[in-house]
Amino acid sequence: MSDAPTPATDSPIATVLSLVDGSEPSTRALQAAIEVAKRYGSALVALSVITAPVFLPVGTGGSPTDLSAYYEEGTKDAKRAVDEGLKLAEAAGVSCRGEVIEASGSTVETIVDFAVREKADLIVMGTRGLGGLKKMVLGSVSSGVVSHAPCSVLIVR
């Protein structure tokens, strides 16, 4: 994954954090983040968070092997989403760094903590992520990030 550019010191938005998960709303959010990064000469970071499962499929018995397979698949999906994000940024002439992290607890807390560490000035994310149950969970994530972020948050429909 490529290094993000050093932001302009006089830029009001030095670092933009864009949440990506491969969904259409996150792609639209990344495109908005790319435009902001272009305009302000900001560093851009594409972040994908692997969330803990809400439940295990019926019949799995809930064994550690099942969780291992869940996280392995989640990591593949997250890396794919970040790689696609990096390609979109590169095609737009914006340097972007990609990160995949595992939520150790709350997804909202993981994103907010990452934004603090990165000194993000703006978080850009979609209103909803992937479909089904994940859609309900990720909708609550965008609401939680808006409530707890250390910086401005742009929600893209």
Image: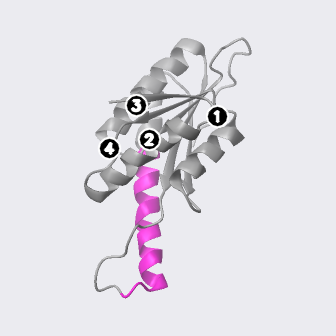
| Mark 1 neighbour class, 10 Å CA radius: few under 14, some 14 to 19, many 20 or more | some
Foreground label between 3 and 1: 1
Q: In screen coordinates, is 32 left or right of 1?
A: left
Residue 14 appears at what percent x and percent y?
66, 22
Give above or below for 114 relative to 35. below
Cα distance between the residues tagged 3 and 2: 12 Å
**Which mark is first along the chain, 4 or 1?**
4
Residue type of the residue flagged with mark 2 = Ser
Which badge, 3 or 2, is on the more N-terminal residue? Answer: 3
Q: Which residue is mark 1?
A: 150
State the image quarter where residue 40 is shown: top right
Q: Quadrant of residue 148?
A: top right
Q: CA distance from mark 3 to mark 1?
A: 19 Å
Front in this rendered view, residue 135 or 14: 135
Residue of label 2: 142
Residue 76: x and y, percent? 43, 59
